[in-house]
Image (spheres, grey):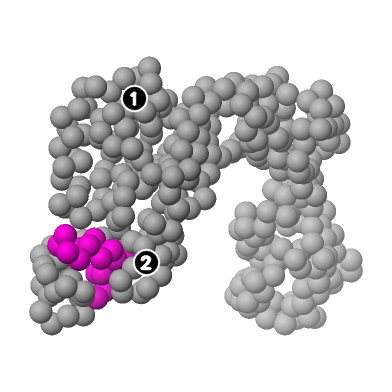
Amino acid sequence: MESPLVRDNPLLLPLNKEKTIYDGFITVQERDFRLRILLPPDRQFKRARLHCCWQLKHLLHGYEHIVKQRLQQSADLVSFILELKTILEVGLKSHRECRSIPPPQYYSQLISEMETLGWGKLLFIDTEFRTLRLKAEDSCGRHHVLTIKLKSKHPAETPECSADLPVPLAMTWTPQSTLDQLHNQFLLILESLTEFWDVLDEIDSKTWILEPEKASLSDTMRRIAIGNNVSIKVEVDPRHPKMLPECCLLGAEHVVTPLRNKLNANMHLWNPDCSVLHNLRDVLEIEFPSPATHEKSSFSVECGICYSYRLEAAIPDQVCNDPRCGQPFHQACLYEWLRALPSSRQSFNIVFGECPYCSKPITVKMATQK
């Protein structure tokens, strides 16, 4: 009658009559691992020794204490092998480099698809031939990168795709799809976003941008300088880039309030046929400072507490409302300063205190945790 050990591990066999030496393979997730088990004459597992192939050693790295514990506690070889397989399954999940090697047709398929697509579009491929980066150019000459992570059963399995876009990357894939078709889908998505990028390019070139410091193609927000310590933050909709964006005016109340009133009063004048920048000028009834007329240093006023302009990614966005002061501060700096003063008080997430410069009343919201 076939023993449970032979039934579950047909490639692991005893090498002597006493059955104290076993050599062969155990199979986990369709992968075979070579090992040898040496038992003492009394067949006590506490003194058993385990010899592994290098792949098994690599996979069990960090789990040695668990294997040793299982050797101490297992009643027989069958139960130990079962425990060992469980440990290996966990190890395989956490070791990406231990994935099974794709069959030869995976590589021939990949080479065939790349020849159709064109090797000139390939920017990068990793040593496992799983991750590819393909370059693309939209009709306005902007350069883009499409990152593709292929599965071992390519093209039967849908690859993972990512790119620096302001919208989720939605790609269609079937077992008959190719990398060339995927690249063409990406080009169509880029074309659908060119108007959005054109809107932001005009803002970037004709105004002083305070944030983000280095905009990426996925950024939808711009903080535009209006004057000293006054700016407007606009959030452009990638799908409807010429519609009225979400706007937030930042600065001292005595400066921001008239601008906010103009924005509310003139909102009906917004013309979707004109550019966002042109509409902002008309609605706010202002001319934005531009690189052609102003130096950026005019708007890069340092924080009155830490004496720097940038604090990690943040710039001073809290301003004393007293017209005679108008000193800017980083939100985090002002919050920590006011919180340390005995005279300050807090209500919910707002701290009330005095301006470090003019001692006039000033408030700040609690700094958000990142």
Residue identified by numbered label 1? 243
Toward the top, the furthest residue is 273
Q: In the image, is residue 281 above or below residue 128?
A: above
Residue 12 visible in the displayed image = no
Q: Relative to 230, say whether 111 is above or below.
A: above
Please, what secondary structure does the residue beneath circle 2 have?
loop
Which residue is at a point 67% across and 57% down the rendered structure image?
95
Q: Residue 359: which quarter of the image?
A: bottom left
Question: Which residue lies under the disc numbered 2?
Answer: 302
Residue at coordinates 45% horizontally, 53% vertically from top-left? 295
Which amino acid is tagged 2?
Answer: Glu
> Going by the image, does 263 lie left or right of 290?
left
Above-or-below relation of 146 to 266: below
Q: Nearer the viewer, mark 1 or mark 2?
A: 2
Q: Is residue 329 magenta?
A: yes
Q: Where is residue 261? Give x, y as percent.
A: 15, 37
Q: Where does residue 255 sit, x and y in percent of width and height?
A: 19, 50
Q: Is residue 130 magenta?
A: no
Q: Amino acid at mark 1?
A: Met
Identify the image quadrant of residue 136: top right
Q: Which residues are magenta?
A: 319-337
Q: Residue at x 66, y 22 (%)?
A: 184
